[in-house]
Image (spheres, rainbow, N blue to C red):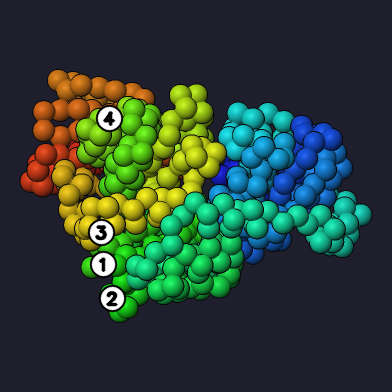
């Protein structure tokens, strides 16, 4: 079968099949010859279809251990300090026709598909004997249990709560270990879409798209919950809505969590991605922390956290990373800090949201363009009197607004995030940049 490619597309094109899975397994097996490799998969049809071919390729050179159907944070947790490589077959928040591979080393630092995997990739012949071996592969012979230690960690670390919450598991990988953990921590929880189904019958497993949040908003309102949370398909993103069904952006959640961490550990280094509201560094500095801006993406953020020994990192895209667990994503720890903030401040989530939502923010706006580089250069010229930063795309800081414009690595898109001191300026400047991009693109 053929599936649309996610995360590994820079190696093999836009579609993945059994031949690719076997070839990738063999190439990775060679790279980690005689080493221990942990492999898991999310609930996707593609992940389960390609898994045996990938493992057969790996087994020619390496020792393979199969963790079963797990979330991406569980794969990181299970790998760190115990295996030389961790792999999960997943396509994160994408629709069911996608699949892909995420890999990390023994420190749970991601392997770069382009820099570390593409140079060693070679396509091998998928013979009839290999197909037969994959078909008859007994995964039980390779099975290891990494869930119990994961559950034990969170049940000890996270405080049980009597708050009434709603949880949308989006029929994804968190319907297994994470569901068990939340079931023990909360006596008053409403679970929806809480069985695994790789077809994602309720909605796409995305924490950012409004059409994917309708179920959790409805559940919160119907059951008079104090908050609602939604996981993405592989469980490394956490979306949050307040008691009124309003969505909290990832940067607002980052600010809330950062404040709580700094109560425990003053002078901590906290990383935030450059799309985040300026309320994030303001809060970090106000409470004695050291705010460090990063380019977008888990690969860059995790490497930076290790290099500078950061305590926490947050992204606009609902990824939250903690040194405590191994510098990788942990939605469960993020939830724990959000509940802590509500308890200690004695405030509802909507009150916290209002407190931290100081500056009007556009959210991410995408533009399909013919020439990303040309348009970015012209935008720089247009705003030449403002401060320029080129950490990731272009960030331009003007008197009463700022914006970041960066190219997509996989599509002919430019992504805009803009924030201003007031709503009127934010809307005017978004419109100005929209018109400017449309004019420049039309001229090509």
Q: Residue 110: x, y in percent?
A: 58, 37
Q: Earlier in the sequence, mark 3 or mark 1?
A: 1
First in sequence: mark 2 vs mark 4? 2
Q: Which residue is mark 3?
A: 349
Q: Residue 351 at x, y = what percent?
A: 19, 57
- Distance from the alpha carbon under mark 2 to that under mark 3: 13 Å
Q: Secondary structure at mark 3?
A: helix
Q: Residue at x 14, y 20 (%)?
A: 385
- Residue bearing mark 2: 224
Which label's residue is closer to the chain start, 2 or 1?
2
Labelled pair 2, 1 in contact (Cβ < 8 Å)? yes
| Residue holding disc 4 | 288
Q: Which residue is mark 1?
A: 243
- Where's residue 388, x and y in %? 25, 22
**Element under label 4?**
loop
| Disc 4 versus disc 1: nearer the observer | 4
Of the image marks 2 and 3, the number of the one nearer the N terminus: 2
């Amino acid at each position: 079968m053929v599936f649309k490619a996610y995360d590994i597309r820079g190696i093999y094109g836009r579609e993945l099949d059994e031949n690719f899975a076997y070839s990738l397994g063999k190439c990775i097996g060679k790279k980690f010859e005689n080493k221990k490799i942990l492999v898991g998969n999310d609930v996707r049809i593609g992940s389960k279809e390609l898994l045996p071919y990938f493992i057969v390729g790996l087994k020619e050179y390496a020792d393979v251990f199969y963790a079963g159907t797990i979330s991406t944070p569980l794969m990181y947790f299970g790998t760190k300090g115990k295996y030389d490589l961790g792999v999960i077959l997943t396509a994160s928040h994408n629709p069911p026709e996608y699949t892909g591979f995420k890999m990390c080393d023994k420190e749970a630092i991601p392997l770069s598909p382009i820099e570390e995997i593409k140079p060693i990739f070679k396509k091998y012949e998928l013979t009839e004997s290999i197909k037969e071996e994959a078909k008859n592969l007994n995964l039980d012979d390779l099975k290891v249990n990494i869930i119990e230690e994961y559950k034990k960690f969170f049940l000890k670390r996270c405080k049980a709560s009597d708050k009434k919450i709603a949880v949308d598991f989006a029929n994804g990988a968190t319907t297994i270990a994470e569901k068990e953990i939340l079931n023990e921590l909360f006596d008053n929880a409403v679970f929806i879409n809480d069985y695994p189904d790789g077809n994602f019958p309720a909605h796409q497993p995305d924490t950012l798209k409004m059409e994917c949040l309708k179920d959790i908003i409805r559940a919160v309102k119907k059951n008079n919950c104090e908050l609602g949370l939604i996981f993405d398909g592989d469980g490394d993103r956490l979306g949050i809505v307040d008691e009124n069904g309003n969505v909290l952006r990832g940067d607002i959640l980052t600010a809330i969590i950062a404040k709580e961490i700094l109560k425990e550990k003053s002078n901590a280094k906290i990383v935030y991605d450059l799309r985040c509201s300026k309320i994030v560094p303001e809060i970090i500095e106000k409470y004695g922390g050291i705010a460090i801006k990063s380019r977008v993406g888990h690969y860059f953020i995790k490497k930076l956290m290790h290099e500078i020994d950061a305590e926490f990192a947050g992204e606009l895209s609902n990824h939250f990373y903690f040194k405590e667990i191994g510098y990788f994503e942990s939605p469960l720890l993020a939830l724990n800090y959000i509940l802590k903030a509500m308890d200690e401040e004695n405030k509802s989530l909507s009150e916290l949201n209002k407190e931290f939502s100081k500056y009007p923010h556009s959210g991410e706006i995408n533009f399909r363009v013919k020439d990303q580089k040309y348009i970015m250069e012209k935008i720089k010229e247009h705003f030449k009197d403002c401060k320029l930063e080129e950490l990731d795309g272009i960030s331009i800081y003007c008197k009463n607004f700022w914006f970041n414009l960066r190219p997509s690595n996989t599509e002919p898109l430019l992504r805009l995030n803009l924030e201003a001191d007031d709503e009127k300026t934010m809307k005017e400047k978004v419109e100005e940049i929209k018109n400017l991009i449309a004019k420049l693109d039309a001229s090509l």
